[in-house]
Structure formats: C-alpha cells, structure tokens
Amino acid sequence: MTVKATKFKSSLGINYPSLRDDPLRTGLRWLAGKRADDGAEGLWRIHDKLYELTDFIERHPGGPEWLELTKGTDITEAFETHHLTVAPENMLNKFYIRDAKSPRNSPFTFKNDGFYRKLKTNITKKLAEIPKRPADRSKTIADLLVASYIGLALLAVIWKSFTCGMLSGIFLSLTCIAAHNFFHQKDNIRMYYFNFTLMDYSEWRISHALSHHLHTNTINDLEISALEPFLQYLPGNKHGLLRFLHIVISPGVYLFLFLGSFIRSIISLFLKEKKYSPVIFLAFSVLGLMVVVSGEVIFPLTMFGFIQFTGSLHFGAVGLNAAHHHPDIFHDGDTPRPKHEMDWGIHQLDAVMDRKDITGSHFLVLTNFGDHALHHLFPTIDHGLLEYLYPTFLKTCADFGIEWRLCSQIELVKGQFRQLIKTDPNAEPPRPLKPFKSL
Ligand code: HEM
C-alpha cells in the first residue's frame, strides 16, 4: 500500500493521513491509515490513554462492529459522541493499560466546561422529557419506503414502465437515506435497508459515521478524499480552467456512487480485506423477485440497473448538497479558529449549514439528511426526536455565542458548486464567538 502524498496541507495541524491517496479509498484502508497514524499501539486510544477492549467487543451494547473495526486507532471522537450517559466513561478504568506516547493527531477538544460537553449534558436531560413516539414513526416511514421501492420495482417489470423504474429508484435513494438514521444507532434490522442499494452499511459506518461525522471537512474526512480527483472540495491545488470540469462531471460522479461502491466491496472481498457477509448482496434479492414476477431475465436486469443508477443520481444530488459545502463553511486549508476554540462541537457548527426548506418536517428530515447540525452532534439520536431538541440546542449555542446557520436548499446547491471551483482558502477564521467564554 502506498504511504505517500502531500496534496493538501491541513490548516488544523492534522498530519497528512497515511493512506489518504490510496487508490481504493475504502473505509477499511482509511482505518489502516489511522492505525499507522494514531499512536494507539494496537489498542484503543481515548484521549491520551490506551485501553484493551478485546474482551468487551461482544458485550458492547452498541454492537460488536464498532470496536472490532477500530482496534488500533484513536476512538476519542467516536467515544465522546456516541454515548449520552456517563456509563461508558465509568467503565473505562477497568480496561486501562497505559498512557499513549505520542500526542493525538487531532486538534479537537472535549473539555468539561467546553461547548460540546455542556451541550451533551443539556441535551441528555431534555431527551428524558420528550416523547419517544416519533422514533417509532421513523421506523414506520423507513418500512413504507422500502415497501414502495420494491413494489414500484416489481410494477416496473410487470408494466415494462421506466416511469415506475424511475420512481422506484427515487424511493430506493430515500430508503437508503432513511436507513442511514439506523446504522448510526446500536445494531438493528433497519440498518440493513441501506444495502438495498449496491452500497454497504458497514462500509458507511466507517466512511460516514467514523470518518466524515467525526473529522468533518478535514483532510481526514473520507467523504471528501474518496471523491478526489473527480470532485475536490478542499481549497487549493485545483488546476486553472480544469476546475470547472468538476461542475460538469458532478452528475456523472453521482450516477456511479452505488456501482463504484459495489465494485470496491468486491475488490476488498477478493483481496480478503473485507469479511464476507451475505448482506453485501441484499440488493440482488429484489432483482430475483423482478425475475420471478416477470418470468424474464434480460428486461429485469436492465430495469434493475436503471433503478440503481436513478437511485444513485438522486442520492448523490441530495447528499452532496445537504449541508457541508459552501464557501462560508469551514474546509481544511481555510484559516482556522484559535487553538482554545477547537472544541469538537464548535468545529461541527463551523462545518455545516442547515436548510430551512427541510427543518420542521419529520419525513423530509429523515429522507434528506435534515437537521444536520444536531444529527452530527448526536448521531445516535433518532432523526424524529431532533426537532424537540432545538430549544435546548439554541439556548446552549447562545450561552457560548455560537451561531447556528440556516439557509435555503438552492443557496446550498449554488454554494456547493462555488466550493468546487474555489481555490483560495478563507483568510478569516470562522465567525468569532460572542460573548467570549474561555473553553
Ligand atoms: C468506536 C468507539 C465506539 C462507538 C462508535 C460506540 C458506539 C455505540 C453506540 C452506537 C451505542 C448505542 C447508543 C444508543 O443506543 O444510544 C453504544 C452504546 C454503549 N456503548 Fe459504545 N461505542 C464505542 C466505544 C465504547 C467503549 C470504549 C465503551 C466502554 C468501555 C462503550 C460502552 C457503551 C455502553 C455502556 C453503551 C450503552 C449505552 C450507554 O450507556 O450510553 N462504547 N455505543
């Protein structure tokens, strides 16, 4: 594996990730790079301490996969943001082995009197008071979406209708976005809905939950590096007029997200890097049904491909225009905040903008990566519950003088394209905090 490249320099002081320019750019290789970079010495690192969690993997209430995957890496951000109770922290002592020898390769802090920990305390209190029924509604919506996807796919082959096929593709994409709510949580059946696309939920637990969510818009964000050189969101190193090509080829990139991901899964399986699981092939169960109901092979195969490509196009368009790319949003390379403001939660709010067209509707939030700031801050909380948390969230933001930014969907689409062609990093750091509080 190649371990060399210096395409971007992190303005946050993050060392260039070892396998950032690896040709395959899978989550598993991203983790292999972290193993080389994090100073975890084959154990699990949280802040500056190393823990041996092997015996706890199978007993972990969030499911074994999270710990299995992250052995040998720094899991500070994952640990801090996936638990709302103090129970996990209280357990750590019995797994302690020794202190780490090197400093963390991450600029982010989680101080007790800092924004993120204060917000987490306030949100956890509020969570105990709010109704839980909307979380059940999320499950119902996801079930109806998957049923609509399959129903429309079958109608598409029975009626030989590409209109039904197109609708089926859109429902497939909506199912996948709703399933994303569930793969962030402890293991559950609905996380597998994600695999009705040609993508794999397990890969996304790494590339999205562990990389993108925790290292948002930094050189360590795999959702940014995996798209390079086709789409380049970090400022700098873009070639003259060629950078406008990014805009032209964007729809082509969206179109191949599902298929590209499947091909990379198969290569990883072939190279024995990825463990075999039948769920990787779940998408083809619907193709099987299409063959059975139509009594044909070629047409269902064509329609299945059409549906997957339509879904991929929709998913890419929604996902890449959802929250993170706009010249006013912090991207690594831009002038950062001063060190004492490097609270992880503050960075999250610097790296996101929410959309006023989506916020407020449970259905739209669940199917459009809505309430994105709150979701990033508390990924295990069901999307249906997030709207009840806004008063607490906004009050804490006000206490720390932090702004939560809302804009329109169209403004984000325009901003996303502007970010693609932007070469010069922002010279000013993100908005100053007011009133200033020592973090
Ligand atoms: C890669 C690091 C980790 C990730 C991504 C992770 C993820 C999760 C998730 C998704 C849940 C379910 C949360 C929910 O349903 O609200 C959970 C629960 C839990 N995890 Fe972890 N976990 C990690 C490391 C750890 C460690 C190191 C410990 C303890 C030594 C731990 C202890 C627990 C406990 C006790 C729960 C039950 C819920 C609670 O009390 O907060 N986890 N974890």
Image: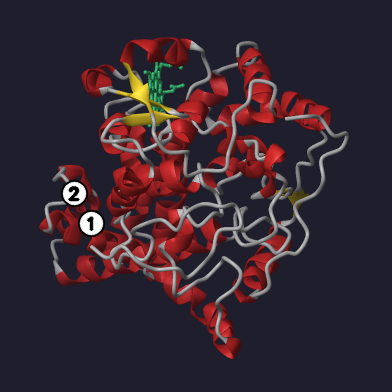
Q: Secondary structure at mark 1?
A: helix
Quadrant containing ligand 1? top left
Q: Is residue 235 found left or right of 32 in the rendered image?
A: right
Colour treatment of the image: secondary structure
Residue at horizontal 13%, vertical 45%? 276
Q: Position of residue 149 (x, y in %)?
A: 37, 50
Point out which mark residue 265 bears: 1
Nearest to viewer (mark 2 / mark 1) = 2
Quarter containing the N terminus: bottom left
To which quarter of the image does residue 312 belong? bottom left
User: Number of numbered discs present?
Assistant: 2
Q: Nearer the viewer, residue 364 or 103?
A: 103
| Ligand 1 within 8 Å of the CB at mark 1 | no
Of residue 51 and residue 252, the one placed in the foreground of this image is: 51
* Residue at the far right in the pictured view: 435
**Residue at (59, 26) in percent of width and height:** 385
Q: Establish if 234 lies above or below 215.
A: below
Sequence-wise, which precedes: disc 2 or disc 1? 1
Locate residue 146, reporting x and y percent: 37, 44
- Which amino acid is tagged 2? Lys
Residue at the extreme bottom: 241
Rendered view: 277 above or below 153: above
Q: Are marks 2 and 1 in contact (CB under 8 Å)?
A: yes
Q: Quadrant of the C terminus?
A: top right
Q: Secondary structure at mark 2?
A: loop
Taking the spot 31% from the left edge, 44% from the top edge, the residue there is 35
Relative to 195, is 126 on the left or the right? right
Q: Which residue in the structure is indicated by mark 2?
A: 274
